[in-house]
Image (cartoon, coloured by chain):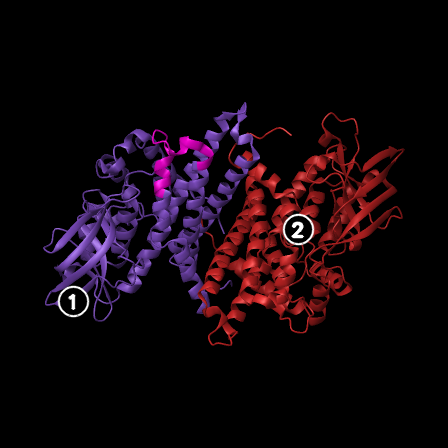
Chain colours: A red, B purple
Amino acid sequence: MNIQFTREQLTLRDELRAYFAGLMTPALTAECERDMGEGGGPLWRDALRQMGNDGWIGVGWPEAWGGRGMTPLEQFIFVEEIMRAGYPFPFLTTESVGPILAEHGNDWIKRELVPKILKGEVLIAIGYSEPDAGTDLASLKTSAVRDGDEWVINGQKMWTSLAHFCDYTWLAVRTDPGAAKKHKGISMFLVPNSDPGWSCAPVQTLGGVRTNATFYDNIRVSNDYLVGELHGGWKLITGQLNRERLSLINFGPISELFNQVVHWASAAQMPAGGRVIDQSWVQQNLGRCRALIECMKLIVYKQSWAMTEEVLDMADASAAKVYGSEGFIEVYRMLGEIVGQAGLLRPGCPQATAEASKIERLYRTASIITFGGGANEIQRDIISAAGLWMPRASR
Amino acid sequence: MEFGFSEEQREVQQLARKILSDRVTPATLSAYDEYQSPRLDRALWQQFATVGLIGVCIEQRYGGMGFGFMELALLIEEVGRSIAPVPAISHCVSTLLAIQRFGSEEMKEAMLPGAVAGEFLLTAALAEPLNEDPADPHTMTALIDGDSLVLSGTKTAVPFASQAQYILLAARTATGVAVVLLDPQATGVTLDQQRSTSFEPQCELLLDSVRVPLSSAITLTEGAGIMRWVGERSAAAICAHQLGATDCAMRMAASYTSERQQFGVPVATFQAVGHRMADCYVDVECLRLTTYQAVSLLASEVAATTEVQIAKIWAGDAGHRVSYACQHVHGGTGIDRDYPLWRYCLWLRHNEMTLGCSAAQQSALGARLAMGEALFN
C-alpha cells in the first residue's frame, strides 16, 4: 500500500502538462469552448491527429498496437492531464470502445481500425439507447438481418452523442428475435456513418450540449463489421460500460476549476472590505469540495491500478460512477454559491468571468452522467449485489 | 502507486483478525457495558504482546516487530472491526510512536521494551475542554522551577488514564509548548472518572502544581511540532478504527437484510433498502481510500496535514451515515441490546467526535485554503 505516484509517473505528468500547454493554442481553446466541451471542430481534429502522431493516445497500450507499452495508470495520467488542459478528449472512442475492439474485433478491425484510433484518425459514437429502450437496454429493437453475405440494418437510436462528427457508430442490434432471453439475441456492429442509409438529427439539451437521434435505413454491411460473436453482444456492452463508467469520472478538470475558484476568491475584494475567501461559509464550502474531489481522485486512481493488476471489481466501478457523477453536481453547486450571481452569467456575456461562466454552464450539464452510462439506480443495484452480496429482486 | 497489501501487511491483518475473532464476541464485550468493569481485556492485550502486535511499529532493538505505520494502522483497523477492548490507539500510536520518534535514548530504553511486552500501559492526553488541537494547549500550563516542571491545568477525555503508568501531555510554557510523561501517582494529580458514550475508560485529568522532573520531559519548547506529529497519527489511527467498524456494521446490515423476510421476500430485495446499503458501500470505500492515503503518506514521513484532515472528515461523515443507515434497515433489531450492532454505533459516534469532527476539520481545511495551502497540484 503506497498511494503516491512514482518518480517516473510524476515526470510523465510534468512532460504531459508542458506538451498540452503547447498544444492548446488560444484558437483551439476558443474552438473547444464554442463546442461546449464536446470537440469536433477542425482545429480539435488536427490536435487529435497530432497527439496520435506523437504517440500519446496509446501511451498505456501495448507496443504491438502502436502504443508505448505503459500501464493503464499512465494512460489515466494522460487522459487526466489532457482534460485538465481543457481539451475535450474523445475518451469513449479511445478508452472505452477502443480496448473492446482490440480484444474482440476480427482481423480487419484489428488491422485497419484500432491503429487508426491510436493515431487519432477514427472516432466512434455509441448507439445503445432507443426511444423505448433506455435502462432496460436489452429490449432494443434495431435489427440486423442476414441477406446472403451481408447484414441489413434498420432502426433508430437515441442520445447518440458525438455521432455528428464521428466516423462509425458502435451499434447494438437484435440479431435473434426468437432468443429465449432478450439479452442473448443481441450483436454488436460497427456501422460507417458515411453510409447513405445513416442519418442523424440534433437533440439540444439543457446544458447546451448537442446530442443526436440517429437513423439506420437499410444499411448493408459485410461480416467484417460484426464485432465479437453473433448474438454475443451483451458481454461486449457490459464490458464497454464498465470502462465507460471509469472514463466518465475524470478529476482533472474539476480539480483545476477548484483551484481557479480558490485563486479568484483569494483575490476578489468585497465592497465592505475583506476578501471573498475570508468568509467562514466560503471556507466551509471549499473544505467540503476539497475533501469530495480528493476522494474522486483516489477512486479513479484505485480503478486504474486495478485495471493494471487486472483485479477490477464490478461493484467498485459502479461505486466510482455513482460517487463521481453525484459529486460533480455537489461541487458545481458549492463552487457556484461562492461566485454568487456571477455564476448565472452565460459564457460570452460581457460581464462574465471565465471561472464563473464555466460554472454556469457545468451546473446545467451535470445531470447527464447520473443517468448516462447506466442509471445510478442500476449502479446501486450492482453495488448491493456484487459488493455486499445482497439478493436482488427479479425483473 | 500501489493499492494492494504487501506480504507483511497481510500477515499482520491475518494475525490480528484471527486473535480478535477468537477472543472478542458479543458475550465478552457485554462484560463492559455500562461500565460494569473497565473496558480493557488484559488477557487479550497480553496475547497481543506475546505475538508481538503491540510493538508492530517499534524497532526490533526495543522488542518490536520493526514494521511501519501502515502495518500499525491495519492492526487498528482490525481492532475497529471487532471493537476490541484494548488501548491500541492511545498506547501504540499516541504514546509509543511519540516516544520512539522524539524521546531520549534513556527514555526509549526505560519505556519501549516494557510497553511493547505489555508490562505496563501508556496513554496520551490530547484534548482540553473546548480545545481539541493537541498541538496548541492553553488550559494546561507549565513553569520551570529548578530541576522540575510545575504543571497546572486540565485535560479531558483521557483514555485509560486510570490504568496507565504514564500519561503523555503537552503544556503551554512562557516560551513554547512542553511535552512530558506524567506519573499519575504524583502529588497534585486528580483523575476524575468520565462516563463516555462508548464505555471507554476515560478521565478528566486535573493538575494542581504537579512537579515533574525535567528528565521526564520530551521537550520544553518544541512541543507544538511534536504534538502536531502525534495528533495527525492519532487522527489517522481513529480513521483506521472507524474504517474497520463501519465495514463490519455495514456487512452486518447487508447479511441481516438478506435473511430477514417481509411480504414473503428478503427485505434486501427492496431497492430502497439495497440502495441505502449501496450508499454505505460508497461511504466506506471513500473512508478506506482517504485513510489509506493519509496513513501511507505518514508512514513515509511525507507532509500529510491535508490528507489527514480529509480522512477525518470522511471518518465523521461516513461513520454517522453508516451508523444510522444500518440501525434503520435492521428495524428494532438494530437497537436491541441482544444484537451486536448497537455497540458499533457507539464507537462510530466516538470516532466521529474524537480529535476533530467533520465540521471542524472542514473549517480548518478551508482556512488553510484561504492561506494558499492545500490546493490540488
Can I make out residue B123 in this image? Answer: yes
Q: Is residue B263 depicted above or below B43 in this figure?
A: above
Label tally: 2
Which residue, as the protein is rendered here, is positioned at the far top?
Answer: B264
Tell me which amino acid carries mark 2.
Answer: Ile
Figure quadrant of residue B363: bottom left
User: Which residue lies under the disc numbered 1?
Assistant: B143
Q: Looking at this view, is A317 or B196 the one in front? A: B196
Residue B33 horizontal side relative to residue A22, left or right: left
Q: Quadrant of the C terminus of chain A?
A: top right
Residue B272 horizontal side relative to residue B43, left or right: right
Residue at image position (55%, 36%) is B272
Can I make out residue A18 in this image? Answer: no
Residue at image position (70%, 35%) is A234
Host chain of mark 2:
A
Residue at image position (21%, 61%) is B140
User: Which residue lies under the disc numbered 2?
Assistant: A368
Q: Is residue B234 depicted above or below B11 in this figure?
A: below
Q: Is residue A317 magenta?
A: no
Query: Callout 1: helix, strand or loop?
Result: strand
2 vs 1, front mark: 2
* Other-residue count near label 2 (Cα within 10 Å), few / some / many at <14 / 14–19 / ≥20: some
Residue A160: mark in rendering? none
Tell me which amino acid carries mark 1.
Answer: Leu
Residue A283 horizontal side relative to residue B22, left or right: right
Q: CA distance from mark 2 to mark 1?
A: 63 Å
Residue A51 location (% of width, % of height): 69, 61
Figure quadrant of residue A172: top right
Residue A42 location (% of width, % of height): 78, 64
Q: Is residue B332 magenta?
A: yes
Task: Specify the segment rendered in magenta.
Answer: B328-347
Query: Callout 2: helix, strand or loop?
Result: helix
